Image (cartoon, rainbow, N blue to C red):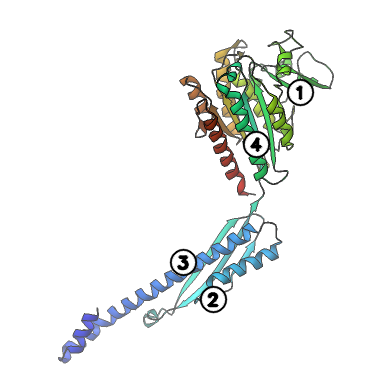
Amino acid sequence: MWRVVKLYRSATGGQMSVLMALAIVPLLLAAGAALDYNSAVRLRVELQASLDAAAMAMATASEQPDEDRKAIGEKYFKQNLAGTALAEIEPQILIDEDTITVSARYDYPTSFMHLGGIDQMILDETSKVMRPFAGSAEVVLVLDYSGSMNTKNKYQDMRDAATQMINDLDGALDAGHFKVGIVPFSAMVRTSMDKSYVNQVSATQTWTGCTQDRKYPYNTNVDTPTSNVDTKWGYIDGNGENGPGYGCAAYQNKKLTIQPLTDNVSSVTSALADMKPLGNTNISLGTEFGWNLLDPQLPYDNAAPYSDKLTRKFLVLLTDGVQTSSEFGSDNSRSVPAATNNLVEICDNIRAKKITIFTIAYDVTDPDVTDLLKACAPGRYYEPSASGSEISAVFSQIKNQIKNRIARVAK
């Protein structure tokens, strides 16, 4: 363009001078407009960055009163714009129940575009962030304690990795914002609940014993038992068979007792330290009881309601083998295929409640098992070998995912 100006200055013909003058005016206006536009873009970027910084600073100051938060936001906004053309702007700050909004406007005076009738460019920017709240986590570990976990140091490595994850989460979350429970399962589970929820047991006192599943479809949901015997769990009395299982004394000796959700983390890790493997594998049963621990209804009712927006629920399921125990199916008979089908249904029902499931196929090579666990927890499936370092790494990854979900929970 400046070559054109030079030609204009060197032109001697009057007609040429007029033509060149007419041609150069729009060129000069276009060049000036480009300069104005680039300056406005640069200022807009600076303004938006300052708004973002102010909003984030206010969100981080979660324990401060709203007036103090506003002062913090104004301070960050001013500091970021000091020494610029935007230094005198005052931000507009709105803090409501859910969000923090910071906005500002600057009328940029044009240098060249005003020649074309545009005196200013309006820069009107906004930054909005969700107000962070101290989120809570409820985590239930459904751990395979069947006899095969005695091999290759598997249950010891699992125990150590799970204990580390529990302690890390307890340290990372605010006091009172972390609950943990454990369901150790093999062919049966041993638990405590009100006697009215157990078949053939009367009165309303606490019962502790072993059980397998309820009748279908109650073994795929968390409906509180009623007077209907099909909704209740069976029971095992001592070493004798009195229901759908046997040998409950061995479960007591191996310390395989369900630990309901609690914020008393040390009591859970202490119980975990004493658990020893025993018997066959009932993955579906363990998962059923894991969901019951996370459900706010009886028989456990230690969990937050599903409507609590500040609480996230997690179920970690680990097994090292195939389903070997039978369960009631839709035809009212017991079989291993019915138990496998029940697990699929339970996983679907758990996810429908917005509970996050992690599955761990621990030292498993059977594709039927790995496919089943992958389907149970899409995108959150792990397949470590019988290695202390591998299972430790898996629990560490799960811990980090839980922490990330809780770090910024918006109401």
Residue type, numbered disc 1:
Ser
| Mark 2 secondary-structure assignment | loop
Disc 4 from disc 2: Cα separation: 49 Å
**What residue did someone put label 3 on?**
45
Say whether residue 85 is left or right of residue 162. Answer: left
The answer to whether marks 4 and 3 mark residues whose Cβ atoms lie closer than 8 Å is no
Is any part of residue 19 visible from this angle?
no
Say whether residue 323 is left or right of residue 237. Answer: left
N-terminal of the two: label 3 or label 1?
A: 3
Disc 3 from disc 2: Cα separation: 14 Å
Picture disc at residue 87: 2
Disc 3 from disc 1: Cα separation: 61 Å
Residue type, numbered disc 2:
Ala
Front disc: 3 or 1: 1
Disc 4 from disc 3: Cα separation: 44 Å
Question: Residue 73 occupies which quadrant of the picture?
Answer: bottom right
Residue type, numbered disc 3:
Val
Picture disc at residue 192: 1
Specify the quadrant that holds the N terminus: bottom left
Question: Residue 198 occupies which quadrant of the picture?
Answer: top right
